[in-house]
Image: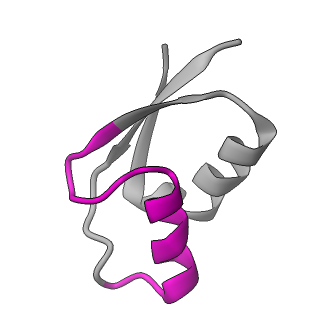
């Protein structure tokens, strides 16, 4: 299964609680932090919810 490299490119301070929780659930904390996640429908849905603050690359 493919992996995704997810980077937080914008601050989460202006996001609502639900979006902030989604970013945290992805494993991102500070702006510029990166994580690798499996490419699953659940992860894709989380990315879609906060795509305006993320950068996503396939590995």
- Residue at image coords 63%, 63%: 49
Quadrant placement of the N terminus:
top right
The picture places residue 55, in percent across and down from the top left corner, at 40, 42
Which residue is the extreme one toward the right? Answer: 41
- Residue at image coords 46%, 62%: 23
- Residue at image coords 31%, 38%: 34
Q: Nearer the viewer, residue 49 or 25?
A: 25
Q: Is residue 22 magenta?
A: yes
The picture places residue 52, in percent across and down from the top left corner, at 46, 60
Q: Nearer the viewer, residue 13 or 37?
A: 37
Query: Relative to residue 11, is residue 56 drawn left or right?
Result: right
**What colour scheme has been applied to the protein in the rendered image?**
one colour
Question: Which quadrant would residue 22 be assigned to in this image?
Answer: bottom right
Q: Is residue 30 magenta?
A: yes
The picture places residue 48, in percent across and down from the top left corner, at 64, 54
Q: Is 14 rendered above or below residue 1? A: below
- Residue at image coords 32%, 73%: 12
Query: Relative to residue 49, is residue 12 drawn left or right?
Result: left
Q: Is 14 rendered above or below residue 27? A: below
The picture places residue 50, in percent across and down from the top left corner, at 53, 62
Query: Relative to residue 42, is residue 28 drawn left or right?
Result: left
- Counting every numbered tag in the picture gives 0
Residue stretch rendered in magenta on the structure: 14-34
């Amino acid at each position: 299964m493919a992996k995704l490299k997810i980077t937080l490119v914008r601050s989460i301070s202006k996001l609502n609680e639900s979006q902030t929780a989604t970013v945290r659930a992805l494993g991102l904390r500070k702006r510029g932090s990166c994580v690798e996640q499996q490419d699953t429908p659940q992860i894709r849905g989380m990315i879609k919810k906060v795509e305006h603050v993320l950068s996503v690359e396939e590995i």
